[in-house]
Image (cartoon, rainbow, N blue to C red):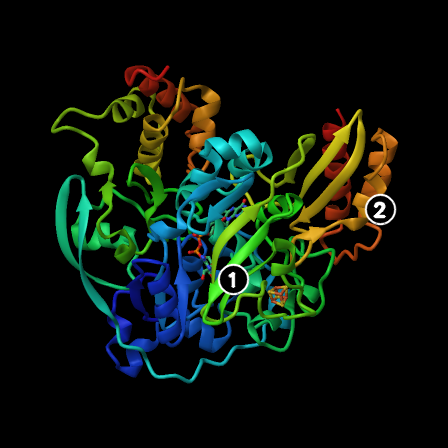
Amino acid sequence: MESFAYSKAANLQQALDLLKSTEGAQVVAGGSDLLSLLKNEVLTPEALVDIKGLADLNYIKDEGGVLRIGATTTLTALGNDAAVRERFPIIAQTIPLIASPQIRNQATVAGNLCQRPRCWYFRSELYDCFRKGGPTCFAITGRNSEHAIFGGAGCFIVHASDLAPVLIALNAEIALQGPSGKRVLPLEEFFVLPRMNPHAENLLQPGELVVEIRIPAPAADAKGIFVKTRLRGSWDFAATSVAMVAQVQNGTFQDVRVCLGAVAPAPWRSKEAEAALKGQAVTADVAAAAAKAAVRYARPMSENGYKIRQIQAIIKRAALALAK
Amino acid sequence: MRNDGADSKGEPGSELTRRRFLKTAGVGVAVLGAIGGWSLRSSKQATADAAPKAAPAKGPRQPIQRTITLHVNNRDYRVIVDTRETLAEAIRDKVGLTGTKVGCNHGQCGACTVILGGQAVYSCSTLAVQAEGAKITTIEGLSQGEKLHPVQEAFLAHDAFQCGICTSGQIMALTACLNNAPGKVTEESIKAGMGGNLCRCGAYVQIIRAGLQAAAAMGKS
Ligand SMILES: Cc1cc2nc3c(=O)[nH]c(=O)nc-3n(C[C@H](O)[C@H](O)[C@H](O)COP(=O)(O)OP(=O)(O)OC[C@H]3O[C@@H](n4cnc5c(N)ncnc54)[C@H](O)[C@@H]3O)c2cc1C
Ligand code: SF4
């Protein structure tokens, strides 16, 4: 590990000031993702600014129906929150499927959304790959069983967050604060594909922090489900996942949002699946048509074609579960 | 990689740690499999596309040390740590409590589990400097003198280990799982609470039985 200076911020303003005034500084929260990258010397920041203890970012509030989640809320706290369990069962259902109990106790909501790719070439300091500023993507001709079937260009990582597709299906917004002030954007727009920027997974600017997630009040008849496939029954990253939130009236999907996980360099909203489901009384045939529509533009690599079959299976499963 | 500070004294020769050697020589393919639990690349493929990466041309950074107080097992320990030191390293090497083990050192196996602020965490994935001020319990802090904790008793009664390397982590995870259980402990809730601890000897069945016994002893069944 390269040496770094360390400072613990006492509050949000101090964290922002430290990030602004410290050259080469990086944010650390739970550290569950970052420490591994520091140990492998994939990242070598000169300073860490610790925001884990920030009480002013550790909250879950229900404000006029909008659920506001502070950035340093842990995954465990999010999953145990009474308001979350009652109003957003899809979140409570997802949390136990993320990592392990220990990681969920440490990991923050913002850290989960900002986690770096799990691509094995990225995680190894031995491969100076395209995402890290090198000349080539080793996954193209190398091992790519965990890689993207959508949205790759130059780099074929998948975004590993399970929380991101769920929050996007819930139409969440993300609030960022940095040297040039505060901005709020749809969470879906926060993530970027390699064709926009192959070196970052999101729009965060230097010195900018994720401060809050906001989830609008869902319609009274909204229902949601998250389905994840993984190689092992205990902790594992998703091979594929789908988050689906629909307004269902008499078995008919009035409105629906479908976001796929672990299949693209960013959480992958499937407008194709949404179009196939919207306004339909969802039967097995309709669900199968939506699944087929979702993968129409998939581009598998040499080892990840299985993701096309898996994602279709879980889209069908999710749609039929919500139609019930 | 453990950093013992020895490579940061400014002598160029001492910079050549194992990782650095592999990096510079571009022959580090074999260590890739150890990272992140992914499958190994075939070495044929790897030599084909693993372009050697030149060592970055930058001067060595000076180590930065901090004096911190770690609150472990109801005692305060004033220790000097490098900012890079993980909590696991500080507990073992500075506090001197070696019951906490380091397995994968990447938050994937659970051997380093300690209880921090009432919750199980991986001490390999937390910096020592981050843990200053928090109440930490390690395996050494469970028994009361000669009297073992109900979870330790249950592990003995059910032979819930073989080689023992994962055991202190298993016991800490199970203790936190039982302490924090909102209601009745079941086989399912133990499996869910213990999902972050691997046992290569495969003592899982006995660990679950130990969990059920300890839950009963702790009035949680
Ligand atoms: C063994 C293992 C299994 C896992 N399995 C899963 C899984 O199944 N599903 C899943 O979704 N995830 C999984 N993860 C990833 C895990 O969820 C993340 O490591 C965790 O959420 C990161 O949170 P953290 O607070 O520890 O972040 P840190 O490690 O502290 O930070 C992660 C990144 O986010 C940045 N960051 C953190 N907070 C902010 C902020 N407020 N503003 C701006 N940048 C910020 C940091 O600079 C860093 O780049 C797994 C991780 C491990 C180690
Ligand atoms: S997929 Fe992206 S991160 Fe992985 S090797 Fe290719 S460029 Fe690097």
Percent position of residue A203, x then y: 58, 65
Q: Tell which of A249 and B212 is nearer to you.
A: A249
- Where residue B121 sits in the image (x, y, percent)? 35, 43
Residue A8 in the image, given as x and y percentages of width and height = 30, 60
**B17 on left or right of A177:** left
Discs 1, 2 touching: Cβ within 8 Å: no
Q: Which residue is mark 2?
A: A293
In the picture, the quarter occupied by the N terminus of chain B is bottom left
Residue sitting at x 71%, y 63%: A152
Residue at 70% over, 65% down: A140
Q: Quarter-wise, where is residue A33 in the image?
A: bottom left
Residue A195, labelled with which disc?
none
Q: CA distance from mark 1 to mark 2?
A: 33 Å
Q: Amino acid at mark 1?
A: Arg
Q: Say if residue A22 shows up in the picture.
A: no
- Give me the disc on residue A123: 1
The residue that appears at 66% across and 34% down in the rendered structure is A224
**Relative side of B166 to B27, left or right:** left
